[in-house]
Each structure stands twice: as C-alpha cells, then as structure tokens.
Amino acid sequence: MNPELVELALRKQRLQIRSAEQRDALVHHAQAFAPVLHGIDRISDGVRWARDNAPLLSGVGIFLLVTRPRAGLRWARRAWMGWQLVRRVRALIS
C-alpha cells in the first residue's frame, strides 16, 4: 500500500479518537449545567401550560376579584410585574 495513504489513514484515526475524547470531556463539563437547564425547562412548561389554559386562569382571576378583591388586586399587581420582567428579559436576549 502507498505509505502516504497509510499515513493519512493513521492521521484520520488519531483525529477521530481525539474528537471522541473531546466530545466526552464536553459532555462531562456540560453536566454542571443540567440543573439550570432543568429549571428553565420547568419554567417554559409552566408558561406553556398557562398559555394553553388562559380561559381557566382568567375565570379563577375573576372569581378571586369578586370574592376577595384585595387579594385579587395584589395577585394582579404581581402578575403585571412578572409580565413586565418577562418583556424586559426578552428585549435583552433578542
């Protein structure tokens, strides 16, 4: 066999082994971010649930305003501040 082809094949094999080692190291280091990413997934699932169940949440909000207006207004203020926070974070990200 041509010695240049053998050398290229060996070089290719060494690069593949090195790439596999680097992938393993990356996976090992990325595991430190797993709790953060899990928390982000839970938040996005909650937002998706709230978006899908908006009529139910609106009904609960109206019921709360009718039965306990002060508590309802307090929760409305918190929701408004949360919405403003989400808008600001989105503006910073994009």
Image (cartoon, grey):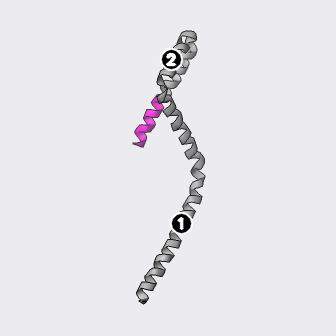
Quadrant containing the N terminus in the rendered view: bottom left
Please rate how many residues cluster around mark 1, counting C-alpha atoms within 10 Å: few if below 14, some from 14 to 19, many from 20.
few
**Residue depth check, mark 1 versus mark 2: number of the one nearer the observer:** 2
Q: Earlier in the sequence, mark 1 or mark 2?
A: 1
Numbered disc 2: secondary structure: helix
Prevalent SS, magenta region: helix
Apparent side of residue 15 relative to residue 28 in the rendered image (left or right):
left
Q: Is residue 88 magenta?
A: yes
- Classify 93 as above or below 31: above
- Classify 53 as above or below 28: above
- Classify 39 as above or below 47: below
Quadrant hosting residue 40: top right
Disc 1 marks a residue whose amino acid type is: Gln
- Mark 1 = which residue? 22
**57, 83: nearer the viewer:** 57
> Residue at horizontal 45%, vertical 29%?
84
- Mark 2 = which residue? 59
Quadrant containing the C terminus in the rendered view: top left
Please rate how many residues cluster around mark 2, counting C-alpha atoms within 10 Å: few if below 14, some from 14 to 19, many from 20.
few
Q: Is residue 66 magenta?
A: no
> Residue at horizontal 59%, vertical 54%?
31
Disc 2 marks a residue whose amino acid type is: Gly
Residue 75 x %, y %? 54, 21
Residue 2 x %, y %? 41, 89
**50, 91: nearer the viewer:** 50
Q: Which mark is residue 40?
A: none
> Residue at horizontal 58%, vertical 12%?
68
Residue 53 x %, y %? 49, 26
> Which residues are drawn in magenta?
82-94
Q: CA distance from mark 1 to mark 2?
A: 53 Å
Numbered disc 1: secondary structure: helix
